[in-house]
């Protein structure tokens, strides 16, 4: 359009230069025509750009508003409601023949809006352009049309200090609220919760499940019993070691055999190494057993009340084994023994693990607390798990809080999917802010174009 205008102005100018008759007044009047054309074109274009900016803002807002429920509407309803919403925002009498079109793409989880309008010109009409066409477009992507998040949360003893557990509960529940609000309908967002210490609690009600391995537990939990039925903790005479009933198990499991401790392989009785070894995690002191098994984990769910209750039930106890928490977080998103909700092939799914901890690794199945090589050895196992999770296309956020001067963890920084997804904090209250930031990143609507 602009090229044609310039061509016409140049033609008028050339004709003016070739004119051989006429007086000075006529000559001056003719000179004004191209000058007014150039100035007028600039004014009309400026007005058109201002109108386009207003139209773009209204179209963006309409796309954002409609995208959350676009997947649950018919194309006719979507179109009608989009027009009503847009017209309420865009009220420019100088824009005529305004038309917008809404197109929802379920596989991409996005809503595309296109808009056109006509604007009558004031000056360019002299040059043969009575109106300008204005076009705009906007694509709003519902960032978590289908989202699955594993919250892997440190429940170790040191979380009792400096208000960390209280802050974690507040931050985690706020995050759940953000994720709940991000869901247009049930099933758009699922969350699992994996509290961890040195072990993970898979719930003692599962003591009869075939995916639990009992050899380590049987060897450590029982009594020496004689034929007459008398039992004690000490071996005497012909006493035989008798494991306790499995229904006395507290629900904790320790790391799987290597290298299944770094994978999400489903447990199978045909491969005992894939099973999860039961352990009565806790501390015996002066003959009294102190149960350090964290609260039982929770698989993927959109029961927001139950998820919040699980957060409230967390209590700090035990040593730190980030590696087992991370492995179970991955397991909860993808594989048995969890029941994984089926995925709809028409939608894109984002899977995320958020790993939070307040301390460095100190103890696992093979490297007990106090061993000089524990941290490095556990870190090495965890690094493999991090790499495997990212290779599977799952995003990892890592959050480390250090209120006692512990250094920044290179392991956690490298474990995160990128540098923007690692957070190092030194105050408990910062947890609320950072979890809110993560929640915003996950749930916000974004203008994609």
Image (cartoon, rainbow, N blue to C red):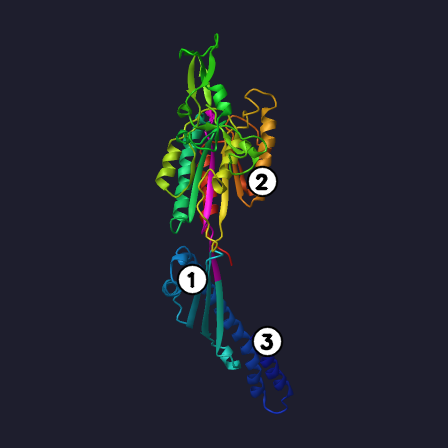
Main SS of the magenta part reads strand
Residue 380 appears in view: yes
Residue 418: x and y in percent read 57, 43
| Numbered label attached to residue 3 | 3
Q: Badge 2, how many Cα within 10 Å: few under 14, some, many 20+?
A: some
| Numbered label attached to residue 344 | none
Where does label 2 land, which residue?
Answer: 388
Taking the magenta stretch, the answer to whether it contains residue 147 is yes
**Magenta range:** 138-158
Vertical side of 176 occupied by 202: above or below: above
Where does label 1 land, which residue?
Answer: 58
Residue 12 left/right relative to 168: right
Q: Name which residue lies at 41% across and 34% down.
A: 169
Vertical side of 114 occupied by 141: above or below: above
Occupied quadrant, residue 104: bottom left
The image quadrant where one finds the N terminus is: bottom right
Element class at badge 2: helix
The one of 267 and 90 positioned closer to us in this rendering:
267
Vertical side of 135 occupied by 141: above or below: above
Element class at badge 1: helix
The one of 124 and 78 positioned closer to us in this rendering:
78
Vertical side of 253 occupied by 176: above or below: below
Residue 64: x and y in percent read 43, 57
């Amino acid at each position: 359009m602009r090229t044609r205008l310039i061509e016409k102005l140049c033609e008028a100018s050339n004709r003016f230069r070739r004119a051989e008759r006429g007086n000075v007044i006529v000559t001056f009047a003719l000179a004004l025509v191209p000058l007014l054309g150039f100035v007028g074109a600039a004014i009309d274009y400026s007005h058109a750009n201002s109108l386009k900016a207003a139209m773009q803002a209204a179209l963006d807002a309409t796309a954002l508003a409609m995208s959350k429920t676009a997947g649950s509407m018919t194309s006719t309803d979507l179109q009608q409601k989009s027009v009503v919403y847009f017209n309420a925002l865009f009220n420019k009498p100088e824009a005529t023949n305004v038309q917008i079109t809404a197109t929802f793409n379920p596989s991409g989880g996005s809503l595309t809006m296109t808009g056109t309008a006509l604007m009558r010109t004031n000056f360019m009409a002299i040059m043969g352009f009575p109106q300008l066409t204005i076009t705009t477009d906007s694509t709003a992507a519902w960032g978590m049309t289908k989202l699955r998040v594993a919250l892997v949360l440190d429940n170790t003893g040191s979380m009792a200090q400096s208000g960390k557990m209280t802050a974690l509960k507040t931050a985690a529940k706020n995050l759940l609220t953000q994720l709940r609000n991000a869901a247009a309908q049930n099933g758009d967002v699922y969350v699992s919760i994996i509290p961890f210490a040195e072990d993970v609690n898979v719930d003692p009600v599962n003591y009869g499940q075939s995916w639990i391995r009992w050899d380590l537990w049987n060897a450590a939990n029982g009594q020496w019993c004689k034929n007459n039925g008398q039992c004690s903790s000490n071996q005497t005479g012909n006493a035989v070691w008798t494991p306790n009933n499995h229904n006395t198990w507290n629900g904790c499991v320790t790391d799987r055999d290597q290298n299944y401790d770094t994978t999400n392989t489903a447990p199978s009785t045909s491969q005992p190494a894939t099973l999860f070894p039961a352990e009565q995690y806790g501390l015996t002191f002066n003959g009294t057993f102190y149960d350090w098994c964290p609260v039982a984990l929770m698989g993927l769910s959109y029961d927001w009340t139950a998820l919040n209750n699980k957060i409230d039930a967390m209590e700090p106890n035990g040593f730190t084994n980030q590696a087992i928490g991370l492995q179970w977080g991955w397991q909860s998103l993808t594989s048995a023994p969890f029941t994984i909700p089926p995925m709809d092939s028409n939608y894109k799914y984002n899977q995320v693990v958020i790993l939070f901890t307040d301390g460095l690794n100190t103890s696992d199945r093979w490297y007990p607390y106090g061993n000089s090589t524990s941290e490095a050895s556990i870190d090495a196992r965890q690094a493999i798990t991090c790499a495997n999770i990212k290779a599977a296309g799952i995003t990892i956020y890592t959050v480390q809080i250090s209120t006692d001067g512990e250094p920044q963890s290179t392991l956690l920084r490298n474990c995160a999917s990128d540098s923007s997804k690692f957070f190092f904090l030194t105050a408990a209250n910062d947890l609320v802010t950072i979890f809110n930031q993560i929640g915003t990143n996950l749930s916000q609507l974004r203008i994609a174009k």
